[in-house]
Image (cartoon, helix red, strand yellow):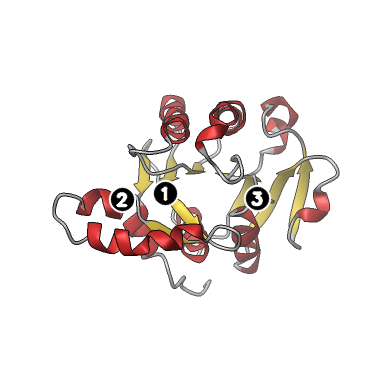
């Protein structure tokens, strides 16, 4: 396994707090963008890079010599009432990260998007789709992960929907949508991101990782 040099935006968030310790334990070098004063929130073994995720000028020069950029910034606990924040935070940070990665010629960009299209949360998934389009426009080799809802501490209420999912996945008319918009666990999500980082794409292409593949991400092979 090749050890990666990874620049991370959003490493102190819900998913980042699970992913970064895994990457450090597997021998990858991690530098993580944080707001000034929040350096202590990073897991041990990560180098903090103070800056503003919404302003690429504050961190672009610190991206080299990273070969991988991991973008995890997003509004906590998304809901329809946060449509404006999706544009001002999720989309703005994604564009800042993508532009910085392209400018600094990062070899592989990993973006946590969201499953789409979807019958709910239109503003949320449309913003993520715009970010994906911008990623394609910049011509970066990239892996885009598309979970719908990631179950974990403080994020467990969708467990109540499991009976409905069970039925929908067995009906031909709803099977594909139910699987694409299915629930994944935080452990599955973290493992899927690690796999994406350790197996980059190349040749000016974007690999899409949907929910069924995220669910199959465990267990991770031991680092060689």
Q: Is residue 68 left or right of residue 210?
A: right
Work out how far the residue at label 2 is from the one at label 1, CA to CA, in angstroms: 8 Å
Q: Return the residue at label 2.
A: 180
The residue that appears at 66% across and 56% down in the rendered structure is: 29
Q: Position of residue 80 (x, y in %)?
A: 50, 35
Q: Residue at x 41, y 28 (%)?
A: 133
Confirm or deny contact between disc 2 and disc 1 (CB under 8 A): yes
Judge from the rendering whether residue 185 lies leftward or rightward of residue 5; answer left or right. Answer: left
Q: Secondary structure at mark 3?
A: loop
- SS state under label 1: loop
* Rendered residue at 52%/40% (across/down): 79
Asked which secondary structure carries label 2, the reply is helix
Residue 102 in sight: no
Residue 105 occupies quadrant: top right
Q: Residues within 10 Å of mark 3 (few under 14, many from 20)?
A: some
Instruction: Report how far apart the C-alphas of labels 1 and 3 lie in the structure.
Output: 17 Å
Q: Earlier in the sequence, mark 1 or mark 3?
A: 3
Numbered mark located on residue 82 in the image: none
Q: Is residue 73 visible?
A: yes
Among the two numbered marks 2 and 1 on one chain, the one whose residue lies closer to the N terminus: 1
Q: Quadrant of residue 219?
A: bottom left
Identify the residue under disc 1: 148
Residue with the mark numbered 3: 13
Q: Residue at x 45, y 57 (%)?
A: 158
Q: Which percent across, then down, holds residue 3?
A: 57, 60
């Amino acid at each position: 396994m090749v050890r990666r040099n990874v620049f991370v935006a959003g490493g102190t968030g819900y998913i980042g707090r699970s992913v970064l310790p895994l990457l450090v334990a597997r021998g990858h070098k991690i530098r993580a963008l944080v707001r000034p004063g929040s350096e202590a929130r990073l897991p041990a073994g990560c180098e903090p890079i103070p800056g503003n995720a919404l302003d690429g000028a504050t961190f672009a020069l610190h991206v080299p010599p990273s070969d991988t950029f991991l973008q995890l910034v997003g509004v906590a606990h998304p809901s329809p009432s946060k449509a404006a924040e999706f544009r001002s935070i999720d989309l703005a940070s994604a564009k800042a990260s993508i532009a910085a990665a392209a400018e600094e010629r990062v070899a592989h960009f990993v973006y946590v998007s969201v499953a789409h299209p979807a019958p709910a949360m239109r503003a949320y998934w449309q913003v993520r789709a715009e970010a994906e389009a911008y990623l394609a426009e910049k011509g970066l080799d990239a892996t885009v992960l598309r979970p719908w809802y990631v179950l974990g501490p403080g994020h467990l209420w969708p467990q109540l929907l499991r009976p409905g999912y069970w039925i929908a996945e067995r009906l031909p008319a709803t099977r594909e949508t139910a699987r694409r918009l299915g629930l994944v666990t935080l452990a599955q999500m973290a493992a899927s991101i690690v796999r994406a980082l350790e197996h980059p794409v190349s040749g000016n292409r974007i690999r899409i990782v949907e929910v069924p593949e995220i669910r199959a991400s465990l267990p991770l092979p031991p680092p060689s």
